[in-house]
Image (cartoon, rainbow, N blue to C red):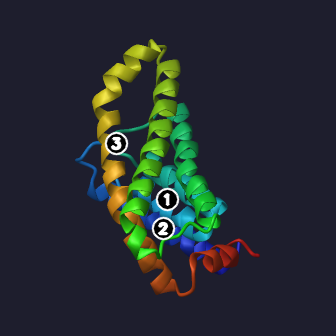
């Protein structure tokens, strides 16, 4: 891993962890998923996945609520899906500069945030049910308020934050997203 990519992974991971602790008192409202997604979008699926895994590696270990090892591992790998999907989307030449399509693109990012969060929550609920030998339906129903809050907050964060954040990252780092992704993936 070269220095540029390592710096990006460390910076995005640190930002993700810091924002998690800032919002620790607000259950299931976090910028982490969004940051991991943006990291993947800008710098490729491998970098995005690393950001997701490392964020949960640190945050999950030092979480004041504690952790259960199999659920912790599940959250690490489920979080990486945000980075992987963001990276694949970023490589598809997704148009973020189209000002006349800003609303459409914002809504689309919100849909992506919802789908990824739905998958994340479903996987973590299934693993929780298996680990604690709970009926899956009971686990899903009990977790429903947290799931809905997580999904709704991510729809809002992804919808409102994606395009402005991608434009800022592009401006700060210089170049376009495709170039940034190729630099950090060694192409």
Q: Give the residue at the far right of this rendering.
A: 187
Horizontal relation, residue 57 to residue 21: left or right? right
**Label 2 Cα crowd, 10 Å radius (few <14 / some 14-19 / many 20+):** many
Judging by the rendered image, the residue that carries numbered circle 1 is 36
Q: x and y percent of residue 54 in the render?
A: 54, 56
Q: x and y percent of residue 146 in the render?
A: 31, 34
| Residue at 58 percent of width and 53 percent of height | 85
**Label 3 Cα crowd, 10 Å radius (few <14 / some 14-19 / many 20+):** many
User: What's the mark number on residue 12?
Assistant: 2
Of the numbered discs 3 and 1, the one sitting upstream in the chain is: 1
Of the numbered discs 2 and 1, the one sitting upstream in the chain is: 2
Q: Disc 2 vs disc 1: which is toward the camera?
A: 1
- Quadrant, the C terminus: bottom right
Label 2 to label 3, Cα distance in Å?
A: 21 Å
Label 2 to label 1, Cα distance in Å?
A: 7 Å
Of the numbered discs 2 and 3, the one sitting upstream in the chain is: 2
Q: Find residue 9 and report its image quarter.
A: bottom right
Q: Is residue 53 above or below residue 93?
A: above
Residue placed most toward the observer, 22 or 149: 149
Whether pointer 2 and pointer 1 mark residues with C-beta atoms closer than 8 Å, the reply is yes
Dot 3 falls on a residue whose secondary structure is helix
């Amino acid at each position: 891993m070269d220095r540029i990519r390592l710096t990006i992974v460390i910076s995005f991971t640190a930002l993700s962890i810091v924002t998690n602790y800032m919002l620790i008192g607000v259950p299931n409202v976090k910028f982490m998923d969004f940051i991991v997604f943006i990291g993947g979008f800008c710098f490729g699926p491998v970098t995005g996945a690393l950001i997701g895994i490392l964020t949960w590696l640190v945050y999950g270990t030092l979480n004041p609520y504690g952790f259960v090892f199999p659920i912790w591992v599940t959250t690490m790998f489920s979080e990486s899906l945000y980075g992987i999907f963001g990276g694949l989307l970023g490589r598809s030449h997704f148009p973020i500069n189209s000002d006349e399509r800003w609303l459409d693109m914002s809504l689309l990012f919100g849909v992506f945030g919802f789908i990824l969060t739905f998958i994340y929550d479903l996987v973590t609920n299934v693993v929780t049910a298996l680990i604690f030998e709970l009926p899956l339906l009971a686990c899903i129903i009990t977790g429903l308020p947290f799931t809905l809050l997580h999904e709704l907050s991510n729809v809002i964060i992804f919808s409102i934050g994606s395009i402005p954040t991608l434009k800022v990252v592009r401006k700060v780092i210089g170049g376009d997203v495709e170039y940034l992704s190729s630099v950090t993936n060694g192409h």
